């Protein structure tokens, strides 16, 4: 008898359905797993043997063959433990395998038969939901899987509970979304009101947040660049349901799911400048998502930008245009989403004091030139907004004036984004809704200038050395500024403010 159980293989964002087949035949006692299993799957043999011992079932002293089809798809991960064990039990006729015909199962077995957490539960649940199937998963994956919208989540603490549920001995309660860990509103340890002065920088951050624009801050050490970037996440609105599911799927595949099962706050990733290329773009032997994908629908903050490896920085060029990253391997190409907002900070020179009115760089201008040359022109051209963050005055540190909190700014950012989302829907753009990501016909429609604004913009372009990409970025920022003022058209002063963030030499 050949027993079959459905499970999944995680290859990129979209899981593939896998059939685990088990056959017990006469011959020398052996246990063989075929179908391109990795070392983790191979080690499942010992976990399954121990589980059978805990169940009081003797492992067959015959030839046990487990095949995972399709055989040409690599199988990796500990979530194959449960389907392999169930398939063998079905081949032994210890359970009625027909009861599992309309289910997908995932789970890592402990030596005591318990089911341990596995990554990718929400992705597996979404695949099961699409195919009209139920999902058997560990109890620790319940919150995560429940957010998929699948009503057939069977979350069990151990394999005995799985068997009892399907044999009718003891039914498992329907999985429900736990509200215990969900926060009411936003709770951050930092707030925009912590920042003294820096009105120009705060304005630039609000514009960048409103339109999803890439932002580069240049300033002397201690001027507040990292402090501002850390607080930019506090002015972003929550993720939409679709964005939340996408982001949660990525974190689930990376084994980083939150306790409440859903990521509804835009992610903020800040890798160290010593990070490798693979850790940023993703890949490795298991082709896991990197920081680019972990920042999907959120912010990727690169502090001390010139200190990153040149190869790592240049690897951002294509994802910033396509909003995705493709990890190419010999036998497969895996694409992860990377719709990020890039925020970076850097010193003006190696010592950090170039352009500072109080302290001077001793090797100017060579120190600044050599330091900035670590960043290629194409990367700089992909920043919509480039600002110089000046050191604050001592008097500003002791000012008593009330400063705006993040909640107040976030409300304005949310209103501006709602305008863009509504307009994107009328343009037929269902994915890239913010001005910072607009392109093609949608970009030309939303950045159409009046005659006075057009003439003014043409004079700016003619008098400066701005690329075509740079021109589009100025228009995108101008459109965002107009949206913040609830203006249907882009006025001359909108273009003027947008241009100052992009013109060469403005920093």
Image (cartoon, rainbow, N blue to C red):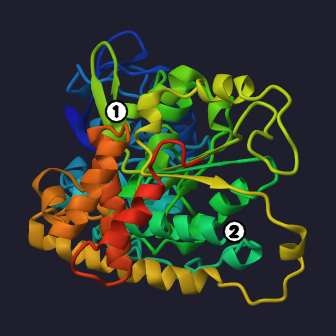
Q: Is residue 242 above or below residue 257?
A: below
Residue at the far top in the pictured view: 28
Instruction: Say which of 185 and 146 sits in front.
Output: 185
User: Dot 1, how many residues are within 10 Å of its Cα: few (below 14), some (14-19), or many (20+)?
Assistant: few
State which quarter of the image contains the N terminus. Answer: top left
Q: In what element is the residue under mark 2?
A: loop
* Residue depicted at x 65% and y 83%: 405
Which residue in the structure is indicated by mark 1? 318
Q: Which mark is residue 198?
A: 2
Q: Is residue 213 above or below residue 69?
A: below
Instruction: Say which of 135 and 483 sits in front.
Output: 483
User: Dot 2, how many residues are within 10 Å of its Cα: few (below 14), some (14-19), or many (20+)?
Assistant: some
Q: Which mark is residue 337?
A: none
Give the Cα separation between the discs numbered 1 and 2. Answer: 32 Å
* Residue depicted at x 23% and y 21%: 71
The reply, left or right, for residue 479 in relation to residue 294 is left
* Residue depicted at x 40% and y 41%: 382
The reply, left or right, for residue 486 in relation to residue 41 is left
The reply, left or right, for residue 157 in relation to residue 218 is left
Instruction: Say which of 415 and 112 sits in front.
Output: 415
The number of numbered badges drawn on the structure is 2
Which mark is in front, 1 or 2? 2
Q: Position of residue 334 (x, y in %)?
A: 31, 31
Q: Position of residue 244 (x, y in %)?
A: 39, 65
Whether residue 263 appears in this view of the structure is no
Which image quadrant is residue 367 in? top right
* Residue depicted at x 74% and y 72%: 195
Q: Position of residue 79 (x, y in %)?
A: 44, 41
Whether residue 163 appears in this view of the structure is yes
């Amino acid at each position: 008898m050949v027993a079959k159980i459905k499970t999944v293989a995680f290859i990129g964002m979209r899981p593939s359905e896998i059939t685990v087949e088990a056959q017990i035949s006469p011959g020398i006692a052996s246990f063989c797993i075929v179908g391109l299993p990795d070392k983790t799957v191979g080690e499942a043999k010992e976990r399954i043997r121990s589980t059978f011992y805990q169940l009081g079932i003797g492992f067959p002293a015959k030839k046990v063959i487990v095949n995972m089809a399709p055989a040409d798809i690599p199988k990796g991960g500990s979530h194959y433990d449960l389907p392999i064990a169930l398939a063998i039990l079905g081949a032994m006729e210890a359970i009625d395998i027909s009861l599992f015909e309309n289910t997908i199962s995932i789970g890592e077995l402990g030596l005591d038969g318990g089911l341990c957490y596995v990554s990718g539960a929400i992705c597996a649940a979404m695949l099961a939901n699409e195919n009209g199937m139920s999902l058997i998963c560990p109890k620790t994956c319940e919150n995560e899987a429940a957010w998929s919208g699948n009503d057939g989540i069977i979350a069990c603490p151990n394999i005995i509970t799985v068997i009892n549920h399907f044999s009718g001995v003891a039914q498992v309660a329907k999985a429900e979304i736990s509200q215990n860990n969900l926060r009411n509103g936003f709770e951050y340890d930092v707030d925009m009101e912590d920042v003294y002065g820096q009105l120009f920088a705060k304005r630039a951050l609000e514009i960048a947040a409103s339109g999803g624009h890439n932002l580069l801050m240049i300033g002397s050490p201690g001027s507040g660049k990292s402090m501002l970037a850390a607080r930019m996440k506090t002015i972003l609105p929550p993720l939409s349901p679709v964005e939340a599911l996408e982001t949660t799927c990525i974190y689930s595949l990376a084994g980083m799911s939150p306790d409440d099962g859903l990521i509804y706050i835009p992610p903020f990733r800040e890798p160290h400048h010593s990070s490798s290329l693979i850790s940023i773009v993703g890949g490795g032997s298991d082709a896991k998502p990197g920081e680019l994908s972990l920042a999907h629908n959120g912010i990727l903050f690169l502090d001390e930008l010139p200190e990153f490896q040149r190869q790592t920085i240049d690897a951002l060029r294509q994802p910033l245009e396509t909003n995705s990253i493709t990890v190419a391997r010999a036998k497969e190409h895996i694409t992860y989403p990377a719709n990020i907002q890039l925020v970076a900070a850097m010193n003006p020179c190696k010592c950090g004091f170039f352009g500072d009115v109080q302290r001077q760089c001793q090797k100017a201008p060579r120190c600044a030139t050599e330091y900035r040359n670590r960043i290629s022109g194409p990367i700089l051209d992909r920043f919509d907004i480039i600002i110089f963050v000046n050191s604050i005055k001592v008097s500003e540190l002791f000012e008593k004036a009330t400063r705006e909190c993040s909640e107040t700014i976030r409300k304005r950012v949310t209103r501006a984004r709602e305008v863009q989302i509504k307009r994107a829907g009328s343009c037929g753009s269902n994915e890239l809704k913010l001005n910072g990501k607009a392109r093609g016909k949608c970009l030309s429609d939303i950045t159409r200038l009046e005659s006075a604004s057009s003439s003014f913009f043409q004079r700016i372009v003619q008098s400066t050395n701005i690329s075509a990409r740079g021109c589009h970025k100025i228009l995108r920022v101008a459109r965002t500024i107009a949206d913040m003022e609830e203006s249907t058209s882009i006025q001359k002063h909108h273009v003027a403010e947008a241009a100052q963030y992009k013109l060469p030499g403005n920093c």
